[in-house]
Amino acid sequence: MSLLKWGMINQLWRLLRAEVALHKHNKVNRQGVVSANAQHYHVIENVLPHHIYEGLLDAVSELHAQAVRENSHWRKGMAIGGHELNSSTVKPWLEYFSGDEFIQRLRMATGIETLALVPAVDTHRLSLLFYDAPKGTEEIGDGTDWHMDGNIYLGARWAGILTLIEDTLDTTSKLELQPFGDVAQIPKRNLRNSLVLFQGDHVLHRVRPLISDERRVVMSLLFSDWPIRTRNPWLRRYQSDVNRAFYGNPQA
């Protein structure tokens, strides 16, 4: 057997094993079965150059009017998906996120040499989330309380939350994580322009409710150390339902 054929067989076997493992993981993580090796998180301060951070801030007010508001069991809040962001005024600032400078900094911070953004076809790659209380309401979170995410990638799934604005009365971020079963609160000092990286399909997390006049705006980013999407139709269908609820667009 040639080396080329042997390599193709090994790659196919790797893909099959990863598909089986991913299916099993998505099935049992709702029952709280997660990896103890996936409980670590990273907070990377001043992750963007100042001019890019300021450029994103300048676009926030305009984009707020274009966001999709969702109020269901899936999520409460407003969001703009990656496909819509790429055709908005924020587009010139998005190229930095896929550049070497940004990716290399994340790889150094995490020690994961293959960490990369997921493909651009995935609207979760880069999205914008708004949290503010609508008129007539006293408080709003994202409606999900403590939860874990699903995963449609064969590699490890890393969620990134980049804080643009967090004007709240709290001394800690509204984002809370629960690694190893213990609540980890993130100090709000130096939170702006900081990226929180964690494996959201293994670590419980939530956004505490905001009260009237509080405001929070974040960019959500999605990374993987092997960003190959599953061919499992049930997982892909579930992700499309999530996309529709978050962004009004079922594209995965």
Image (spheres, grey):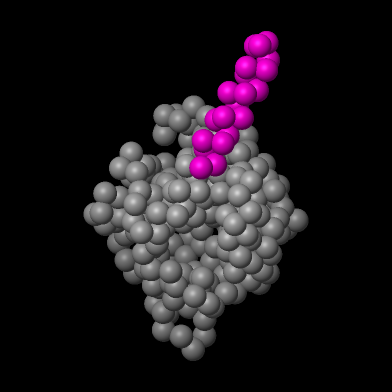
Residue 158 coordinates in the image, percent (x, y): 47, 44
The answer to whether 207 is drawn above or below residue 185 in the figure is below
Query: On the picture, is 145 further left or further right than 58?
Result: left
In this picture, which residue range is highlighted in magenta?
1-20
Q: Could you say which quadrant of the image residue 49 lies in?
A: top right
- Foreground: 53 or 181? 181
Q: Residue at x 48, y 78 (%)?
A: 133
Work out whether residue 18 can be spotted. Answer: yes
- Foreground: 34 or 209? 34
| Residue found at the far front of this picture | 1
Residue 69 coordinates in the image, percent (x, y): 59, 74
Residue 143 coordinates in the image, percent (x, y): 44, 73
Query: On the picture, is 109 further left or further right than 74?
Result: left
Q: Quadrant of the N terminus?
A: top right
Q: Residue at x 58, y 61 (%)?
A: 238
The answer to whether 94 is drawn above or below residue 148 in the figure is above
| Residue found at the far right of this picture | 87
Q: Residue at x 62, y 59 (%)?
A: 237
Residue 90 coordinates in the image, percent (x, y): 68, 54
Query: On the picture, is 102 further left or further right than 233?
Result: left
Magenta span includes 7: yes
| Residue found at the far bottom of this picture | 136
The answer to whether 68 is drawn above or below residue 223 in the figure is below
- Foreground: 220 or 165? 220
The overriding secondary structure of the stretch rendered in magenta is: helix
The answer to whether 146 is drawn above or below residue 2 in the figure is below
Q: Quadrant of the C terminus?
A: bottom right
Q: Residue at x 68, y 15 (%)?
A: 4
Work out whether residue 59 can be spotted. Answer: no
Q: Could you say which quadrant of the image residue 242 lies in?
A: bottom right
Magenta span includes 23: no
| Residue found at the far top of this picture | 2
